[in-house]
Image (cartoon, rainbow, N blue to C red):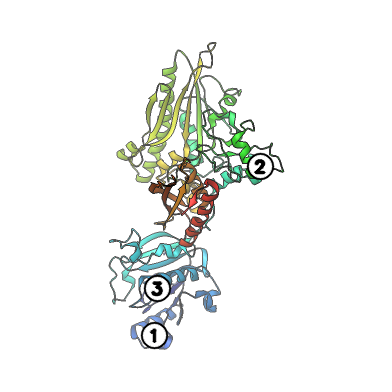
Amino acid sequence: MDQEKTFTVLLVGEGNFSFSSSLCDTSQEIHHITATCYEPEDVVCKQDLTWRNVQHLRSKGAEVYFGVDATKLHEYSFLSCHLYDRIIFNFPHCGRKAGVKKNRDLLSNFFHSCADVLFPKGEVHVALCQGQGGTPADQPKREWHNSWQVVAMAATAGFILSSVLPFDSDRSQEKSFHLIGALNHVFTRSLPVKNIKALQIIDMLTSVQDLQCDDAEVDRGFLGKTCHPINVLHKELIKNCEKNIQVSVIEDMFPLICPNNTCFHHTPHSFVMPDKGWSAAESSDDFYKKPLCSVEQDKKPETYLADICTNHTIGLYHLRPSLTCFMDDITCKSNFRPNVLTIVSGLVFRKCLVSLTTMPVYHEMLMLLDYRSNTPKAQLQLFIDTIKTAIDTIAASVISDATETVDVQKMERHSVRFNQKNEEEYTITMSPTHCDQIIGTIKVVPPKHQYTDSGAHVVTLNLDSIAMSLLDIKDWRLLWTEDKRFIEQFHHRVLKPFQSFSLYPPYYIHDVSFWVKGHTVFDDVEFHTIALRMSKGNIVNIQLLDQYENVETGNIGLCYRLIYQSCDRALSYKSALGMQLKLRDELHRCLQVTLR
């Protein structure tokens, strides 16, 4: 425990008070210690060792209370009159014959009780015997159903596991049970479970209830937020590119919502749901919403949807899938000049299958460099070398900051690779986990007509994917977390490997089965999109378990398994179940499936 800062420490469920006595000695009376036990005082005073420890604690200025139920801390006026920095419960147990269910309930009730007497930034320490916690930190690890499921029990009260340490057995004189392999679990408060910011942005832009939404009012991401790693990475890339070539940066003032005809690449479908534009009825990689100005006030949503699906003159709007939508606008600007690398960066949107590494919203960096028809290969190679050097330089800095030396194997995994698909297109990849991850593309745009010899090399980089690869961030949702413990790791504006503040978050498995009409083509991407929205971003995996056909009706039966898990918040089983029930209703309403 930090010796320079004064902490208020509450110990509950003490046995012979040996741990609290040792803690009191080592704290040198800097910390204010309150020690409690469940047994009444007349029982404790008959135990010689225990009573000596009680007397020692009192001589050091510590407070000692008896008959305290750790699951009802708020009911004791002498405890609830102030808040604590640390609450410690060593080896909780309901009794010799109590099963895992009773001990889970004990933990859950204890955590709920702590919430009332703990400082907002306080910690709850729970020491458990080997295997009881049920986390991967336990070696050997018990089966989940046979453990106390400590992280799941803590989640019911809004706590996340922030660290796990070996229990300091030297502090305890209790030898009645084995302390080998015992672990101290440190829990902290999490923010309440709510829709993640990325999905909030999509919701706001596509909400039919707010057709006049001005995207100038919408948060445009992290490029203006000084310490966010996306912003730091963005500035580092520009700085490193400037070493090889002249750079011109254009501020992203382009609309987030665009008419269908502005897109640089082809979008195959454009259907809209009555009340959520980002849940289209047919396959599409883009998020769509209704027209902004042409809605007839007296039309019902269902009627208007039918009009959109049958009348293409209405003119759909979509959330921009790429900054390449604005190629013509960018090249017409006065600061777009020959032999100058033009850069514009901002948020873009896409529909995608649920994945920890594939995000529906991300920060794209668009880089344009013109070329003359007589030097396309030379200009392209210059472009490739510039990008590779810029990213590799940043990667070397991140790795050396973490290890003080450049790890050759890590550098090789983080090295950028350019893979040629055809004469006009390359993919850019990194392999942080021995599996290639696409972080961008290069496209060669030929001259527009025969009267000019000027074309352009167009690079799009996914800044979020690059940041995840470089900083060892396993989950894209962490980039959008509102928990300050994320941004505080980069407050010096230095990129370094991310340290998780939520360890072994609990996950919950739910299945859903339904019938799809035989003539209907079921859209997996749309299903994933709806599931992500209804779970507030708390689904990490969707797997098709079974598919079969009813020979009599021709209908197709589908069974999916969904895994709910939060990367930064305390997600409880009850919360996940509520999301699952809402998802079932939404699938029936949006996809017209028959639930089983």
The quarter of the rendered structure image containing the N terminus is bottom left
The reply to whether residue 392 is in sight is: no
Left or right side of 519 for 306: right
Mark toward the viewer: 2 or 1: 2
Q: Which residue is at the front of the view, 185 or 546?
A: 546
Say what amino acid the circle numbered 3 marks: Lys
Tell me how far mark 2 sits from mark 3, CA to CA. 52 Å
Identify the residue at image location x=40%, y=59%.
Answer: 163
Label 1: which secondary element:
helix
Give residue 44's mark. Answer: 1
Q: Residue at x 49, y 51 (%)?
A: 594
Q: Is residue 214 above or below residue 55?
A: above
Residue nearest the viewer, comparing 575 with 595: 595
Q: Give the residue type that dot 1 points to.
A: Val
Q: Which mark is residue 163?
A: none
Q: Secondary structure at mark 3?
A: helix
Q: Is 131 drawn above or below residue 535 in the view shown?
A: below
Q: Position of residue 311 (x, y in %)?
A: 62, 33
**Compared to 451, does 271 lie above or below?**
below
- The answer to whether the residue labelled 2 contacts the one labelled 3, judged by CB atoms less than 8 Å apart, is no
Identity, as a three-letter code, of the amino acid under mark 2: Leu
**Residue 123 horizontal/vertical position (percent):** 46, 64
SS label for mark 2: loop
Mark 2 vs mark 3: which is more N-terminal?
3
Choose the circle earlier in sequence order: 2 or 1.
Answer: 1
Looking at the picture, tell me which residue is in the foreground, 241 or 563: 563
Which residue is under mark 3? 102
The answer to whether marks 3 and 1 mark residues whose Cβ atoms lie closer than 8 Å is no
Task: Find disc 2 in the rendering and name its residue.
Answer: 211
In the rendered image, residue 336, in percent from the top left (x then y), is placed at 57, 23
